[in-house]
Image (spheres, rainbow, N blue to C red):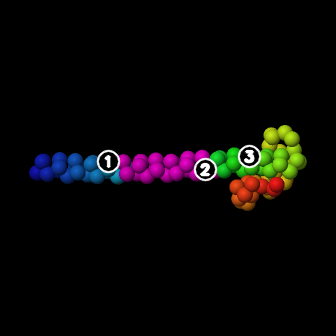
């Protein structure tokens, strides 16, 4: 009887431990996905900023390559910015 209870207890503890490990793995996976998304967003923002500066310089609208925080800048960094820059911008 005592051996049966011990086996049941060990099985129960092992099952709980296994569930905790699965939960931790799931949490780690979600955290990694969040970090990956943040990194992608940061890279896209940097690409958009670079494309804007390059286009503004090509247009002769600015000589300083530093980013310009204007309404036009915020509009320009929209979805079409990367496509615009990839196409070579305005020539």
Q: Is residue 57 left or right of residue 4?
A: right
Nearer the observer: mark 1 or 2; the answer is 2
Q: Which residue is mark 3?
A: 50
Determine the secondary structure under disc 3. Answer: helix
Task: Say if mark 1 contacts mark 3, CB within 8 Å.
Answer: no
Q: Is residue 18 left or right of residue 50?
A: left
Q: Is residue 36 magenta?
A: yes
Q: Which residue is mark 1?
A: 17
Q: Callout 2 environment at 10 Å: few (<14), some (14 to 19), or many (20+)?
A: few
Which residue: 69% across, 48% down?
47
What is the x, y in percent for residue 23? 40, 51
Q: Which residue is mark 2?
A: 40
Mark 3 and mark 2: span between their CA atoms? 15 Å
Mark 1 and mark 2: span between their CA atoms? 35 Å
Disc with the residue nearer the chain's start (1 vs 2): 1
Nearer the observer: mark 1 or 3; the answer is 3
């Amino acid at each position: 009887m005592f051996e049966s209870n011990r086996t049941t207890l060990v099985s129960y503890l092992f099952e709980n431990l296994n569930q905790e490990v699965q939960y931790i793995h799931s949490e780690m996976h979600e955290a990694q996905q969040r970090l990956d998304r943040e990194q992608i967003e940061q890279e896209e923002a940097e690409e958009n900023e670079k494309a804007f500066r390059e286009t503004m310089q090509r247009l002769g609208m600015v000589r300083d390559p530093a980013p310009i925080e204007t309404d036009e800048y915020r509009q320009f960094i929209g979805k079409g910015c990367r496509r615009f820059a990839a196409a070579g911008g305005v020539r």
